[in-house]
Image (cartoon, rainbow, N blue to C red):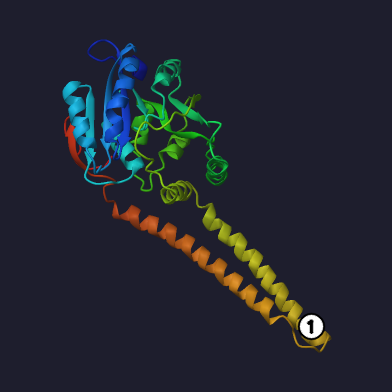
Amino acid sequence: MMDDPKQLQSADGSARLSIVIPAFNEQGNLRELYAVLLPVLSGLSMSWEIIFSDDGSLDGTWREIAELHRQDRRVKGVRLSRNFGHQYALMAGLAHARGDAVISMDADLQHPADIIPELIKEWRSGCKVVHTRRLDPPNISLLKKWSSDLFYHIFSLLSGVHMESGMADFRLLDRQVLDEILQFREEGLFLRGIVQWVGYERTIVTYQCQERFSGTSKYTLRKMIKFAWTGITSFSVIPLRLGIYLGAITSILAFAAMIYAIYTRLFTNTAVQGWASGLSIVSFLFGILFILLGLLGEYVGQILIEVRRRPRFLVNELIGMKDESAEGEL
């Protein structure tokens, strides 16, 4: 009989916990984050490791990780060969995590470390996925709140995978769940959707988002739109199917306009009026056609990326662990 993953023991007789933190140009935050995490993790009856995944930072992020490792061997690092993006940096860190429970969180200190014991409590009670949901502060802009709610609603509608607004990559995964996720080889990583898709026993813990400690957010409006589009297209082909309905509707309109033109010519003996409206309809139809061709091209492009089967990320250097995989083939 296979042991329960929660009962797997480390050398000191306790379950093992991994904290995975992707970082891109976060030099000013790492030492403070470690100082915040240390008393919380030390209070747990578990052995633990912190894995920083450096996503090709251009500042001193990697040097800071190396210095923290010299001070505490439980701090480890994965350095990617260039900037591959947040989701791939997170996946690289998860691929090197060896904990029975694995928590992912951001490096900017907006995810509060003091709810980690609550995540562990829910995990020990039998939940293999412990999500967190952000409670928006009172001063959040209406545009940000509205756009976030709209994305999660559209994603849930199109993909059939329900996601609540405010859910991000701050979560706990059981070892069994993580091992399943690491088998996914698809491009266009959207881990929030994948974690929802795999199922398993789950629960949600709410938290109040904190202020970024230093630096600026790496998610510009352009990156957020790209991230949202990747999430939708990687989980749904409904945008392509919408083309069938749009085509049917516009064809009916065009056919009705043709019948009207024939009727007017035969029974009223007058020339068909409205060349401007006709030109508008033609332009409208061509606009829809090009939009649908763009959607088709987007999916074909993703197929091309998939069949190339290139590594999703490349690991340049490791700190505190064996070089188990030089390439992101997991």
The front one of 221 and 78 is 221
Q: Residue at x 63, y 65 (%)?
A: 248
- 221 shown above or below 256: above
| Residue farthest toward the right in the current orientation of the protein | 268
In the picture, measured across the screen, residue 203 lies left or right of residue 38, that is: right
Is 278 in front, or is 38?
A: 38
The amino acid pointed to by label 1 is Thr
- Residue 233, horizontal then vertical, whole percent: 46, 51
Judged left or right of residue 168, residue 95 is: left
Residue 60 visible? The answer is: yes
Q: Name the residue under label 1.
A: 264
Q: Position of residue 284 (x, y in %)?
A: 60, 70
- Quarter of the image that includes the N terminus: top left
Pick the front one: 111 or 316: 111
Which image quarter holds the C terminus?
top left
Circle 1 residues within 10 Å: few <14, some 14–19, many ≥20 = some
Q: Residue at x 52, y 63 (%)?
A: 292
Is residue 135 shown above or below 79?
above
Residue at horizontal 19 percent and vertical 26 percent from the top: 69
Residue 4 in sight from this viewpoint = no
Question: For residue 254, what is the image quadrant?
Answer: bottom right
In the rendered image, which quarter is residue 286 located in? bottom right
Against 157, residue 167 (above or below) is above
Q: Position of residue 250 (x, y in %)?
A: 64, 67
Describe the element under mark 1 as helix, strand or loop: helix
Say which residue appears at 32% left-offset and 17% top-offset: 41
